Image (cartoon, rainbow, N blue to C red):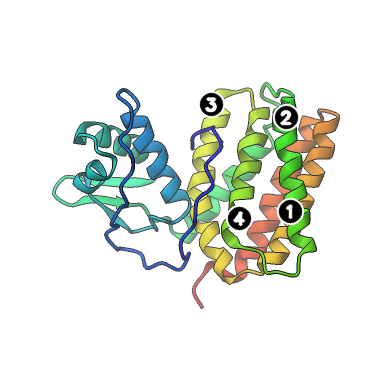
């Protein structure tokens, strides 16, 4: 995914039916020269947050009309998404958001855990004061949510996860590792978001708070090997917790 922080959006029902044709909302015209990247960024975010659920059908014409651009930048954006494995483009068939079976999803998570261990080994770099301040803001907001009697909102929790991941990724100095990790994050994020509909969200917020807290301790002394292990372990524990609701009952 794009290395910049993803904007906070209102997230839809994660149990949305797959295979539907999505009717987009209109946006202000993109600036000349930014069209392809802007379309790509927005579509990629929608896929990651299940606004376009696995199996959804998209059309070039509707996307072009929404962004008030020609079909050329739309095709460029869709080609990039196809290279990342997020959409499938077939002549005469159309554009479909890809689906991942359970075995393949397990493999992707295994890759994410392995890549997390490389965070401290491939050109790691200290975070900037701004990055650390953002991570501390995420931690404080999680603490506020846990202290509240109100049920946590899935949309806000997911946005905090995105903010954490985007800032933490700035530790990675190796561009290939970062790009690959971002792609896998987007692939799994859309399924993880769907699982949240069946999870104890408050408990998930608590686990996430632990991860942020532990990560900040490692970052305080620039222990990047520890940071990678923390990330790897929390991915593993999340996957174990999700085992009960990954498969239909």
Q: Residue furthest toward the front? A: 28
Q: Which mark is residue 156?
A: 4
Residue 174 position within the rendered picture, expressed as x and y whole percent measured from the top left: 60, 23
Q: Which mark is residue 190?
A: none
Query: Comparing marks 2 and 1, which lies closer to the viewer?
Result: 1
Residue where numbered disc 1 is placed: 142
Q: How far is disc 2 from disc 1 in space, using C-alphas?
A: 26 Å
Who comes first in sequence, dot 2 or dot 1?
2
Residue 188 position within the rendered picture, expressed as x and y whole percent measured from the top left: 52, 51
- Residue at position x 73%, y 29% in the image: 120
Q: Are marks 3 and 4 in contact (CB under 8 Å)?
A: no
Within 10 angstroms of label 3, few (less than 14), some, or many (20 or more) residues?
few
Question: What is the secondary structure assignment of the residue under circle 4?
Answer: helix
Residue where numbered disc 2 is placed: 120
* The quarter of the displayed image where residue 126 is located: top right
* The quarter of the displayed image where residue 169 is located: top right
Q: Are marks 2 and 1 in contact (CB under 8 Å)?
A: no
Q: How far is disc 3 from disc 2 in space, using C-alphas?
A: 14 Å
On screen, residue 106 versus residue 69, left or right, reads: right
Who comes first in sequence, dot 3 or dot 1?
1
Question: What is the secondary structure assignment of the residue under circle 1?
Answer: helix
Query: Comparing marks 4 and 2, which lies closer to the viewer?
Result: 4
Residue where numbered disc 3 is placed: 176
Viewer-proximal residue among 171 and 43: 43
Within 10 angstroms of label 2, few (less than 14), some, or many (20 or more) residues?
many
Vertically, is 190 above or below 134?
below
Q: Are marks 3 and 1 in contact (CB under 8 Å)?
A: no
Who comes first in sequence, dot 3 or dot 2?
2
Viewer-proximal residue among 163 and 172: 163
């Amino acid at each position: 995914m794009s290395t910049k922080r993803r904007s906070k959006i209102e997230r839809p029902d994660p149990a949305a039916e797959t295979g539907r044709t999505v009717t987009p909302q209109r946006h202000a015209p993109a600036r000349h020269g930014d069209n392809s990247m802007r379309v790509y960024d927005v579509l990629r975010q929608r896929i990651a947050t299940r606004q376009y659920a696995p199996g959804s059908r998209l059309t070039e014409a509707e996307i072009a009309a929404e962004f008030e651009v020609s079909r050329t930048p739309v095709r460029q954006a869709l080609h990039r998404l196809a290279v990342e494995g997020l959409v499938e483009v077939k002549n005469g068939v159309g554009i479909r958001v890809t689906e991942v079976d359970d075995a393949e999803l397990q493999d992707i998570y295994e890759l994410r855990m392995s890549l997390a261990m490389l965070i401290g080994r491939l050109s790691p770099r200290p975070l900037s004061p701004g990055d650390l301040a953002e991570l501390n803001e995420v931690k404080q907001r999680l603490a506020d949510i846990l202290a509240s009697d109100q049920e946590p909102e899935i949309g806000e929790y997911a946005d905090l996860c995105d903010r954490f991941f985007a800032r933490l990724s700035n530790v990675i100095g190796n561009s290939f590792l970062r790009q690959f990790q971002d792609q896998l994050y987007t692939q799994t994020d859309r399924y993880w978001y769907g699982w949240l509909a069946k999870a104890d969200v408050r408990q998930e917020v608590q686990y996430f708070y632990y991860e942020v807290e532990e990560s900040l301790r490692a970052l305080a002394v620039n222990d990047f090997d520890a940071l990678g292990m923390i990330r790897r372990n929390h991915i593993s524990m999340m996957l174990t917790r999700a085992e009960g609701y990954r498969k239909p009952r």
